[in-house]
Amino acid sequence: MHTLFDRGYLAINPKHHLLVSPRLREEFGNGEEFYRRAGQEINVPDRPRDRPHSETLEWHLDEVFLRT
């Protein structure tokens, strides 16, 4: 999952919901396990300081996430 995130096939929005790029299916013909979870909230650490920063998640959405 980490590699898919790093390469922009997966993203997390600032409200901690999973986003899946359509390019995962287009380029590899798979990813159904991720598409089933698309839009669901991910588990985040209990302590707010350990959670991903919303600014970083927004940057990833704008700069890395592979949209159509």
Image (cartoon, helix red, strand yellow):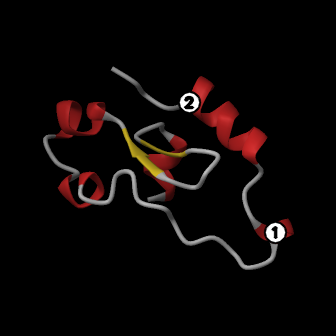
Query: From the image, which quarter does the N terminus lie in?
Result: bottom left
Disc marking residue 15: none
What element does badge 2 sit on?
A: loop
What element does badge 1 sit on?
A: helix
Disc 1 crowd, CA 10 A, few/some/many (<14, 14-19, 20+): few
Query: From the image, which quarter does the C terminus lie in?
Result: top left
Please state which amino acid type lies under the numbered disc 1: Pro
Residue at image position (40%, 24%) is 67
What residue is pinned by disc 2?
64
Residue at image position (50%, 47%) is 5
Question: Which of 63/35 is in front?
Answer: 35
Residue 34 is left or right of residue 8, and the answer is: left
Q: Is residue 29 above or below residue 45?
A: above
Looking at the picture, how far across and down is residue 44, in whole percent?
A: 63, 70
Looking at the picture, how far across and down is residue 17, in whole percent?
A: 50, 53
Residue at image position (20%, 38%) is 25
**Tag 2 or tag 1, which sits nearer the N-term?**
1
Disc marking residue 48: 1
Residue found at the far left of this picture: 29
Residue 45 is left or right of residue 38, and the answer is: right
Residue 6 is left or right of residue 1, and the answer is: right
